[in-house]
Image (cartoon, coloured by chain):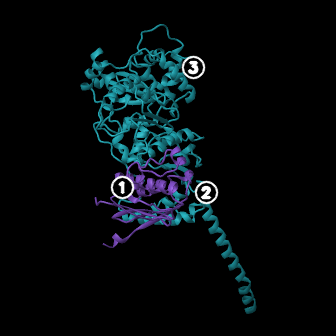
Amino acid sequence: MKDGYYSIEQVFRIKAWDFASAGEASSQIKKILKQLGIDPALTRRVTIAAYEAEMNLIIHSVGGEMRLKVTPQSIIVTAEDRGPGIPDIALAMQEGYSTAPEIARELGFGAGMGLPNIKRCADRLNIQSSVGKGTLLEMYFDIKAG
Amino acid sequence: MKEYYHSVTLRKDKCRGCTNCIKRCPTEAIRVRDGKARIIAERCIDCGECIRVCPYHAKVAVTDPLSSIERFRYRIALPAPTLYGQFKDMVDPNAILIALKKIGFDYVYEVARGADYVTAFVKEALKDPQRKRPFISSACPAIVRLIQVRFPELIDNIVDVDSPMEIAAQLARMEFCEKCGVKPEDVGVFFITPCAAKMTSIRNPVGRKKSSVDGAISIQEIYGPLYNQLSKLKDEEVVQIASPFGVGWANSGGACASLGIDSYLAVDGIQNVIRVLEEIEDEKLTDLEYFEGLACPGGCVGGPLTVENGFVAKNRIRKLAEKARGKPVPEDALQAVAPKIQWRFSEKILPKPVMKLDDDIVEAMKKMETIKRIYETLPGLDCGSCGSPSCRTLAEDIVRGYASEMDCIFKLREKVKQLAQEMIVLSEKIPGGRKETERQE
């Protein structure tokens, strides 16, 4: 199955505190998936997870990039930043836990649902972080045949 | 033919091939080719944006002429509540209904009354906690079609109660036939419409097999004859029975107000509706119970087939609604009527994924890569001179095989420049050859 190896990639740069562009990467991702004819329910899950990851980069990181990779079998969205890193991942995964600063909360963000929401939407999740260096979040979604 | 019937069509002789309509179309359904606009039938949702924006009136909605009612022995008029706001001096809606009877209709039934029934049915549906939230109103046919094309994931959120027009048509026919003892097939039911998409939904309905309405006459067509009658009216019978809520459906927010719920959102103007549907799709509006999206600015009062300025008409409707004579539909009346009519969608609303590049995902991915590559070479001005609404869509059209790179005037200029340079190079070679021939002589 030679087509199985075909893939496309798109990279989006995300700046810290850039609320004016917030959501642009995830809405681009949604548009791409719709054009590729991905199942609407799956497109929705990917978009929601991508949006949360994008907001995390904007609110919590010093900046980074998001990457969309699509193969005929799967969709992989990664969010990678250059810091500051998450000290306690298990704690960050808990619903309602948030380290968002006041200014982000005033904008309606930082309810502590970002990572839990991502976990709910993604089929698999990989998160690595080291304080002072940065965080890598990989979200995997399976495309079911049919 | 049936699948792609559209009310919105082009009058080729009037089209100048400008870029106004291609830029405004919410589903990117129009291209200019060979100097004339062309509507891509699969994509068009009959919203009428192009009718509103065309400076040359080249975009029109095909509706039925008033004379078409003559093919029926008995005729019923179903005026949209928007009609009430079209006349100056705050004409009483009752007088407008009487005027309809003077110009050839045997019976009138207010679509606003149909809206009262829809309200009661939707209130029942809202009680079911199993249903997907937010409910999306099914009243605007352009928005229902927009969801099919651009938001297939939201199809299950559309309330499965049919439109006020369809419900009014059934009730009107039933009432009239019972009262006068005539056969239903001898009766023609005509919607008086501010809306192009309604015409389409009569010919090619979504959610039901066949419309109960036989034709649609535009407000613009009927305005003159009605206006003439209005001045001649004396004291007449009272036929206006819709409630203030039902009349209020002509305005954006009218349906929400009649439901009496807290958590609703009413948005008008198709681009605004798209923005909110994106948010609903991304689950950003989780506490929302009911969404009313209307394609036209201000609601149906801003419809492309109206006569009066939509904002003026909206204000008039607000004041006229207060004086409407009827009351909301009581519970027992609703229960009595429900089994006799088809008020719920009988057919499943299907997605129309016309935006996707290919049925095969690998092919779609390859096309997307090519689009990206072509797009990067285009100027990015979105000028529309090529006939596609943006550089991005031109790249898509090239890959889909509907356009070529030379449709871009900047690419063409580059090419001409390149050719001109090649010609200079060539022309410089000529003297050498000439000398050679001279020498031979």
Q: Decide which of A63, B186 is in the foreground and name it.
A: A63
The residue identified by callout 1 is A119
Residue B224 seen anywhere in this rendered image of the structure? no
Mark 3 or 2, closer to the camera: 2
Q: Which mark is residue B88?
A: 3
Q: Which mark is residue B381?
A: 2
Contact check, label 1 and label 2, Cβ < 8 Å: no
Of the two numbered discs 3 and 2 on the same chain, state the one appearing first in sequence: 3
The 10 Å Cα crowd at callout 1, few under 14, some 14 to 19, many 20 or more, is some
Up/down of B149 relative to B119, above or below:
below
The 10 Å Cα crowd at callout 2, few under 14, some 14 to 19, many 20 or more, is few
Colour seen for chain B? cyan
Type of amino acid at the residue the image marks with label 1: Lys
Q: Quadrant of the N terminus of chain B?
A: top left
Contact check, label 1 and label 3, Cβ < 8 Å: no
Alpha carbon separation for disc pair 1 and 3 = 59 Å
| Tag count | 3
Alpha carbon separation for disc pair 3 and 2 = 45 Å
Quarter holding residue B410: bottom right
Q: Provide the secondary structure element on which disc 2 rests.
A: loop
The 10 Å Cα crowd at callout 3, few under 14, some 14 to 19, many 20 or more, is few
Q: Position of residue B146 (x, y in %)?
A: 43, 44
Quarter holding residue B377: bottom right
Q: Decide which of A43, B95 is in the foreground and name it.
A: A43
Q: Position of residue A46 (x, y in %)?
A: 39, 55
The residue under the point 33% across, 40% down is B132
Q: Provide the secondary structure element on which disc 1 rests.
A: helix
The residue under the point 28% across, 24% down is B184
* Figure chain in purple: A
